[in-house]
Amino acid sequence: MARLTGDRGQMLLIGAFILAVAFVGLALIANAAIYTENIASRNDAGGAGDALQSRHAVAEGVGDAMARANVYNNSAWSHITDNVSAAADTVAVIAAREEAADGRYVDVSATGHTEGTRIADNASGGSVFRGSSGAHDWTVAETDRARAFVMTVDHDNVTGTNSFGGPLDDEFRVNVTDGTDSWIVNVTGHSGTFTVGVDPPGGDAGTCTVSGSPETVTIDLTAGTVAGRDCPAMTFREGVSAPYDVRFNRSYEVRGNYSLVIDNAGYSNPELQSGAGPGQEPYQTVAVYRSTLTFRYDGSGVRYETAVRVLPGEPE
Amino acid sequence: MSDTRGVSTALNYVLNLSIAALLVAGLLVAGSGFVEDSRESVVREELAVVGEQVAADIQRVDRLVVAGDGVTVASVTQEFPERVAGSTYILSLDPGAAEPVELSTATPNVTVTVPVRTDTGLGTGTAGGGPVTVRYDNGVVVIEDG
């Protein structure tokens, strides 16, 4: 008969102990799996999206200031650049204050401005889109780059001397041409509907119509909108290479205002009144085509430092 | 009197003991195998998640670079666990591979690769666990311990 000693049952004890340890390990592993879910659910952990948003807001703020400086402070190049630089400083202060609330650092400064020319017809109440010589088929600009090309056209005066709904071959046209290919936008009141048609080289991109009868219709050629709504057919100078001319044909067919900014410094065009302003339409003034900023962003997990080109209304 | 008297008690005892030993051994083998398998699958899963996060960081930096007009600094830092289910791991970036982000542990021997598509080129780099920085460096995106 076996003698009873304290060694009995060791195998079961040790086996149970090892099993217990294994299952504690299993619990730890399950815990790691739960932590994995936690990492998987992180969303933009570093805040790179905030950096881009901040950059975009800064560019937009300075862009708006630039557009206003080009229109209202355009008596000399230095006045415009001073204003745009001052606006960049103001935007920097606002952005820094806003981001500081969330523990982030933002710094913005203007580093350079590229001179261009703003061409506009701002006649109050609108005018027909003729050149200063009185020409109705004329070249508005000869350039490599244009931006912020916006026309505001009287809804009920389309087709000029003809009544609303005049023949289609009698329409106002914006013709952007490189000499070989042309991108044409026409504005008609065909059958009583305000219609903007787009004809790129080798085809018809389609039309965009305006329903109802608003007093004026804004056509943003570089942004591709008609009356504030997206016009899918309109892609500025699609299929036309730079340099190109911007021409108006049969400008007596519409009334309204327009403006665009081109990247030519000291542009001269006999059809434009130089250094003039509203009251002497159409006119050209010195303008900032592009400003360059340096933008710096320090967030908890993101560092971002980049140059930012500010070109409000540039199509490409 | 036969000399086989009283054997049944001893036999009973031996049988009992061997059945118990078999049971315990079976449980140990099955249990530790199960734990080891779970560990490996958790490691694989966690490496994949960390890899996806690093790939996302690479794409975030790529987005910052593409959105900028002359980027000088773009970096994203994220804190990851030092160990996955008790094992240390190595994170590496190999621009030549079809799935450039590679994570591996030695015990258990697990390697996970994650694809990432960027407009900016990728550079080479390695990092351990903990904070990992994805950074734009002279035209390429690299990773490093951060």
Image (tube, rainbow, N blue to C red):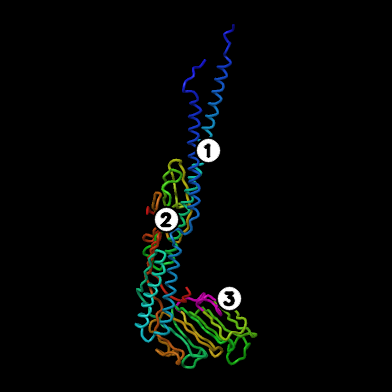
**Disc with the residue nearer the chain's start (1 vs 2):** 1
> Which label sits on residue A205?
3
Question: Residue tagged by mark 1?
Answer: B34
Magenta highlight range: A221-243
Secondary structure category for the residue under label 1: helix
- Residue B98 visible in the shown view: no
Q: Amino acid at mark 2?
A: Gln
Q: Is residue B146 above or below residue A249?
A: above
Q: Nearer the viewer, residue A12 or A41?
A: A12
In the displayed structure, does residue B82 sit left or right of residue A204?
left
Residue A231 covered by magenta stretch: yes
Q: Residues within 10 Å of mark 1 (few under 14, many from 20)?
A: some
Q: Amino acid at mark 1?
A: Phe
Residue A160 percent across, percent down from the top left: 57, 90
Secondary structure category for the residue under label 3: loop
> Which label sits on residue B78?
2
